[in-house]
Amino acid sequence: MLRNVEIGFMSSDTRQLNKNDISLERTSPQKKRQRELARLGQEQGLAELVHSMDCPFEWEGRYSLDDGTGWKDQANEDRDDFENKVVVVKRRYLSSDEPMLLWRPLHNEYLAEFVQGEGRRDYYNEVCPRCYKTDSGHRPLYQCMDCFSPELVCRCCREAHVDRPLDIIKKWNGKIFKPVFLRDIGLRIQLGHTRGEECQHLHQGIHLVSVDYCDCPGRNISFRQQCMCHQWFPATQEDPQTCATFRVLDLFYRLTLHGKSNIYNFMNGLEKLTNNGGITYQKDRYKVFARMSLQYRHLLMLKHGGRENDLDGRPVKDTQPGELAVDCIACPRPGINLPDDWESASLEKRFLYFLFLAIDACFRLKRCLVSSEVKDPGLGTGWSYFVEDSPFRAYIKTVKAQTEMSTCSGLDYANTRYSRGYGATGVAIGVCARHKIVQRTDAVDLPKGERFILRHVNLHLHCVNSYDIVCQWHKHLAKRMESMPDLVRVDVPTRTMDYVIPKLHIHSHNLNCQLNFSLNYTPDVRQTGEGIERPWVNIGPVSTSTREMGPGMRHDTLNDHLHHWNWIKTIALGKILQKRLHNAVAERNAQRRSLEELTERQGDNAERWIKMQLSMMKHEVRLTLAEKEQEDANAGVPSIHHVTPSAFISHGLELEEQQCRLAQDVNTQGKVDKLVLDENPESIPLMLPSSLSPAEHEQGCRTGLLEIELQLRDAQMRRSLEHLRNYLHIRSRLVTYRDSNVRHQSMLTRSHAMLARNDMKTETHKQRYQAAWLVVLKGHEGDKTRVKWMQLRDADIWCLSRSFGQEKTQGDGGGREVE
């Protein structure tokens, strides 16, 4: 039976494939010869012959082999043409179709061989295998990290490295290998003389070598384990034909972490080291090296996480979510770095136990719609920084298309329109805002826009969430958490949390956000800055490499870079905190010296200012008066009414403030609702003790009421002055915002209306302070020296701003600065 078979051969420049059809007859001996030829490697005539070919060659007549150029049929007239043909149909292997799926079950075996390289392996012989000396001075304790043989030798390794003086030597101290120098064991380099021997210095590049695997009966060691024993990383699990040395993998590992080098450029460099001319054809090993480097870096992360030396003997597949991540050692962690009574700390010290978390997304780290989780599974997704992949994907499938409504000006990150053709529009992470350490399993792909979850926060810690769009993110957070899967659900009502916007991003928000989410107005926090942006500076450059990766390889690559970032931040944390402490102490000393110099120059004014600052607030005065009245009641002093004197005066001051607001409304609006009253309510005299004459005090006023009113007036002046300063600061911010951002008539009209409302509040607190100061002055019989507060004039109230520097809020004369 004849059948057409496609036979092809390569052109001389190896760029073109020429194919021809020939008729072959199917016979069983031919297939047997074909398998033998492929196994023996005699493929010069038939370069790549497929084992599982559906249409084997069929010939009539006798079968024989010539001198290695291919099959030869002595009875076939086309034998000369066939001898020059080359079969180029690609050989199909299961390992090339699903290499990662085949490698994952061998986690434990690879990791065991990987970690054994840190110890002596099976080399416990007390006889040096090189010099065979047995005395105590020649114990085999030295191992060369650059030589091929992993055996331990004695000090005779000095003679073996005369021509290799730069190799790295390690010495076994009974527990671990410690690096030593060849100089320490007596090696001296003689310059200016030649030994007449060929240089054996290691040459980086791509090498073609012949390897004989050991297949002795009784030795249960696979070919891949033999490669790993000599620090060669196999590219495949069965019958490896390509390997990469641990040294070259470690070189790429360091280059990609520190210099963000990619595999393509690195492999080009290795090829140029082998042959810089580029004339000789070299087999493409890009995909092979990519798999080996990914597996090597994954094993390093498992090794750093202590998974091979697990006390419970768990296999690698039982690694818990986030177990391989590097945690922040400086953030509060109950049971680790906090005292036992930290929950009962005083209000003055509770800020020490706040956890500051910053959240942000990077839209540079996109991933195109290539490959899938089935074709490219992650080796350790969910074990370190990225969230567990399977539960996350299952949840994403249940989420319908949503349109996030933004109520803040200029912020619409959740509805990014540039998502077509991308499997992920970016990556979001959560870090501790103080130390910039990425939190475990807090990295997640963004299917569309900035949507993700925060977890792994101790229930009892007060959390300060910093996020550039927290004004939108915090809304209905508790309700949204109810629909989340159990894996990431957070019980928001049981936690104490603050929501803030970083100080750089807050200028892009409207005024309402700037007032409600500012770090300046949040108690017990500090200016945490924009630390969340710093990890993106380190990780952002890999976006061009990871954009075309499959989901599994991309997650493993980003996990590795996040792991490196956390480690370098952790080891530098001691120096950073020490530097901050020294800077804080130096700044404290400088501020103290400035205060002392200012106090010395001001003289008596400084003492008056200190007394002003020591004055009590309104609630403190009321509390002090209430305590005194309770003491009088306990002592038997009779009360003339169920309303205490301090409560009576306080209600009177509140009525006075309401009269002032009503009078201001009448003056500004020009009309109020008509009331059937004999007189205007804002002008009814309240007859407070300060408005009575001395004779009226003696006849109908209880003793001590005037003193109570003067104390409350003192607190009223302090509160009015603080409000006045705050509104002047707000005006400065409003003016700056108007000059920088406001355009067009409608927006200018709203800005002017907002400024007018702010000025109205400024006027209210000014009048309240001036009225209270006059009352206190009258109570001290006009003696200004007995009034500790200064008189506030209209010219004293003005705002410091770029466009308002010469303009006064009230008045037109010069005055003292109130802001």
Image (cartoon, helix red, strand yellow):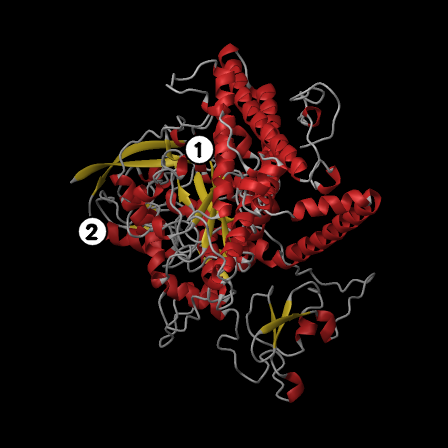
The amino acid type, in three-letter code, at marker 2 is: Ser
Nearest to the observer: residue 770 or residue 815: 770
As drawn, the residue found furthest toward the bottom would be 135
Residue at which label 1 appears: 11
Residue 567, by quadrant, is bottom right
- How many numbered marks does the figure carry? 2
At 42% from the left edge and 40% from the top edge, which residue is drawn?
549
The amino acid type, in three-letter code, at marker 1 is: Ser
Q: Residues within 10 Å of mark 2 (few under 14, many from 20)?
A: few
As drawn, the residue found furthest toward the left would be 1
Residue 665 locus on image (x, y percent)? 48, 20
Residue 661 locus on image (x, y percent)? 50, 26
Tell me: residue 367, above or below residue 731: below
Residue 183, which numbered label? none
Residue 519 locus on image (x, y percent)? 55, 41
Residue at which label 2 appears: 28
Tell me: residue 225, above or below residue 47: below
Nearest to the observer: residue 110 or residue 616: 616
The quadrant in which the N terminus is found is top left
- Mark toward the viewer: 2 or 1: 1
Residue 329 shows in the view: yes
Residue 478, by quadrant, is top left
At 72% from the left edge and 20% from the top edge, which residue is drawn?
806
Nearest to the observer: residue 429 or residue 474: 474
